Image: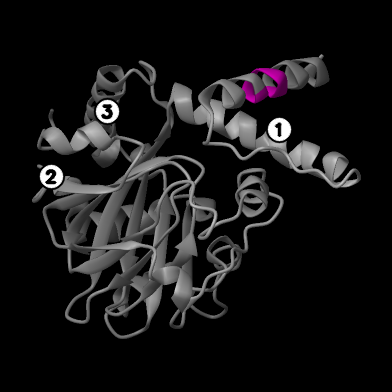
Amino acid sequence: MQCFEDGAVFEHFDREAFKFQHKLMGHPALSLENLARVIPALPPKRVMYSMGRLKEGDDFEGTFSRKPAGRSIEETIENIRVSDSYVMVSGPEVDPSFASLHRELIGDVEGLMKRHGVGTEAVDPQLYLFIASPNSVTPFHIDRYSTFLMQFRGSKEVTVFPQWDERVVTSAQREAYVSYANTRLSWSQETDALGTCFAFQPGEAIHIPFVAGHHVRNGPDDVSISMSIIFNTRQSMAWRRALNFNHSSRRVLGRFGMAPAPVGAQAWRDSAKSGLWQAASRIRGR
């Protein structure tokens, strides 16, 4: 692979979190000089940032739906070492300096997908950049896609929870989140004991499976720079459709004191729900 060091850990692809080495240290696109040039030039909708120390239980998506008043992205980056700031950039590959890196990462991802029989083409693969102050926190959340996260500067602790564990995120919460109906998830110190904490250094990468809950705390010594590639597979798209099916049917079944069977427990049942949702979507489209 061009970007990832290969190994047996990839056998856990999209089932469990695992750590491995990446090959991208020193890549010119990730230099501070290039980031300082690229980020302010991107369309504003691609650059999200927050001021003030976040906590694990904060609403991750809600936080970045509003930009801090009176502080530009240039000022935020310039003072990020001391300002308790968090910058998240979606799709930096629109800049030519990231284009070839984007293609190489997609190549590695699609090679892994073929190896594990979950499709041949990554669905909507996209890069995300994260630049954060020392000790800053990425609140607990789940993602509607699979992730490979790579560290380039600073350290962090990434805590990842089992993919379908009802004690961490209930089925109803997971369905509402994937359906964009509610992005606020409950979190507690008791729940935190169910996660696996990975110490994360430059040159290391971590795989976070589809909808696996996670939160991040950056180390105290330096600004953290990391980048992820997010994507969906044939399997995760089927899971997404099944979760949408459950969310839509939950209200109807609730009138009769019933609830849909959870996604992630039975492959044949998930496949049937995915097919029904896909057929219904086509009918609505017509």
Alpha carbon of mark 1 to alpha carbon of mark 2: how far? 39 Å
Q: Residue at x 18, y 76 (%)?
A: 222
Q: Identify residue type, mark 1.
A: Phe
Residue 166 screen position, x and y as percent? 54, 54
Judged from the image, the secondary structure of the residue bearing numbered disc 1 is: helix
Identify the residue position indicated by label 3 in the image.
103
Where, by quadrant of the figure, is residue 114 drawn? top left
Judged from the image, the secondary structure of the residue bearing numbered disc 3 is: helix
Q: In the rendered structure, does residue 233 fall within the stretch colored magenta?
A: no
98 to the left or right of 52: left
Residue at the front extreme of this rendering: 257
Alpha carbon of mark 3 to alpha carbon of mark 2: how far? 13 Å
Q: Residue at x 39, y 64 (%)?
A: 194
Residue 199 screen position, x and y as percent? 19, 65
- Foreground mark, 1 or 3? 1
238 to the left or right of 260: left
The kind of secondary structure the magenta stretch mainly shows is helix
Q: Identify residue type, mark 2.
A: Leu
Identify the residue position indicated by label 2 in the image.
24
- Residue 28 disc label: none
From the viewer's perspective, is residue 11 above or below residue 85? above
From the viewer's perspective, is residue 114 above or below residue 177? above
